[in-house]
Amino acid sequence: MALSTLSIGAAYDDYKQPGDLFRLMGKQAHKRLIDNIVSRLSKVPRRIQEPQVGYFYKADPNSREGVAMGLGLSAGELVTQ
């Protein structure tokens, strides 16, 4: 099996694959995933939570909404990084 590498300057999207996976998951799987993420992020300071929610938005806007709501953050006020 050969490994391929990205050429310098090639566009690469770190969020496409997790977003695609999230969109393939069913409603119950979404809930479990978001509940697990919220459970872990609820233990860290807000200054860490906010950028993390932005990363979820890059993968899928719906995942951002669920995580933000679970953390008691207003997704609409958070800056997308």
Image (cartoon, grey):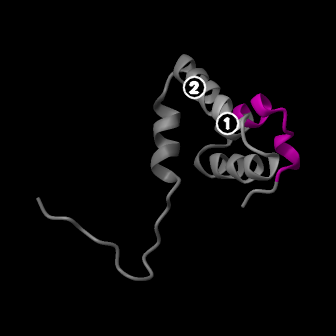
**Tags 1 and 2 touching, CB below 8 Å:** yes
Q: Secondary structure at mark 2?
A: helix
Identify the residue shown where x is 48% and y is 42%. 20
Residue at position x 45%, y 82% in the image:
9
Identify the main secondary structure in magenta. Answer: helix
Q: Amino acid at mark 1?
A: Asn
* Left/right of residue 10 with respect to residue 41 in the rendered view: left
Does 41 sit above or below residue 31?
below
Residue pictured at 80% horizontal, 52% vertical? 47
User: Which mark's residue is nearer the viewer, 1 or 2?
Assistant: 2
Q: Which residues are magenta?
A: 66-78
Please provide percent x and percent y for residue 57: 67, 47
Residue at 34% over, 73% down: 6
Give the mark, 1 or 2, whose residue is nearer the N terminus.
Answer: 2
- Which quadrant of the rendered structure holds the N terminus? bottom left
Q: Which residue is mark 1?
A: 62
Residue 34, image x and y in percent?
A: 62, 29
Q: Closer to the camera, 30 or 44? A: 44
Q: Secondary structure at mark 1?
A: helix
Q: Which mark is residue 30?
A: 2
**Residue 67 location, quadrant:** top right
Q: Nearer the viewer, residue 11 or 50?
A: 50
Question: Position of 42 compared to 59: left or right?
Answer: right
Q: Residue furthest bottom?
A: 8
Q: CA distance from mark 1 to mark 2?
A: 10 Å
